[in-house]
């Protein structure tokens, strides 16, 4: 899935390695089972979706939506 961002030559496709907690790994694995996607596909889709919906995250389970800019 390719996301269209503002044209900026400073950004390119990257590979990122992360460490997940046991709980997050379980949730990701369960999500993969429901969607029939591989973990890398599921994690990429979920991260891109979250980044497009939220402008900030200050702590676990509390994210500020994009439409709350300036508040």
Image (spheres, helix red, strand yellow):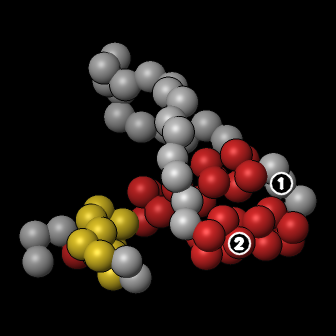
**Rendered residue at 89%/59% (across/down):** 36
Is residue 26 shown to the viewer in this render?
A: yes
Residue drawn 70% across and 55% down? 42
> What is the distance, in whole Å, between disc 1 and disc 2 at their CAs?
15 Å
Q: Quadrant of the C terminus?
A: bottom left
- Would you call the spot at circle 2 few (<14 residues within 10 Å), some (14-19), or many (20 or more)? few
- Identity of the residue drawn at 55% across and 66% down: 21
Residue 70: which quarter of the image?
Answer: bottom left
Which image quadrant is residue 23 in?
Answer: bottom right
Tell me the number on the disc at residue 67: none
Q: Is residue 65 above or below residue 35?
A: below
**How many other residues sit within 10 Å of disc 1, few (<14), some (14-19) or many (≥20)?**
some
- Picture coordinates of residue 62, whole percent (x, y): 33, 81
What residue did someone put label 2 on? 26
State the image coordinates of residue 57 (x, y, percent, origin top left).
29, 69
Extreme-left residue of the structure: 70
Mark 1 vs mark 2, foreground winner is 2
Looking at the image, do the residues carrying marks 1 and 2 touch, with CB atoms under 8 Å apart? no
Image-based side of 31 in relation to 53, left or right:
right
Count of all numbered marks drawn on residues in the image: 2
The N terminus - image quarter: top right
Tell me, yes or no, if residue 49 can be seen here.
no
Query: Which residue, given by chain and number where applicable, does mark 1 sit on?
Result: 37
- Percent position (x, y) of residue 52? 44, 57
- State which tag comes first along the sequence, 1 or 2: 2
Residue at 62% across / 70% down in the picture? 22
Residue 30 shown left or right of residue 9 in the figure: right
Dot 2 falls on a residue whose secondary structure is helix
Element under disc 1 = loop
**Furthest residue in direction bottom, as rendered:** 61
Vertical comparison of 33 with 16: above or below = below
For the view shown, which residue lies furthest in the front direction? 22
């Amino acid at each position: 899935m390719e996301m269209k961002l503002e044209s900026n030559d400073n950004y390119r496709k990257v590979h990122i390695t992360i460490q997940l907690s046991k709980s997050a790994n379980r949730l990701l694995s369960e999500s993969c089972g429901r969607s029939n996607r591989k973990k890398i596909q599921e994690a990429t889709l979920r991260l891109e979706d979250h980044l497009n919906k939220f402008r900030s995250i200050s702590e676990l389970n509390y994210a500020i939506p994009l439409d709350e800019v300036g508040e």
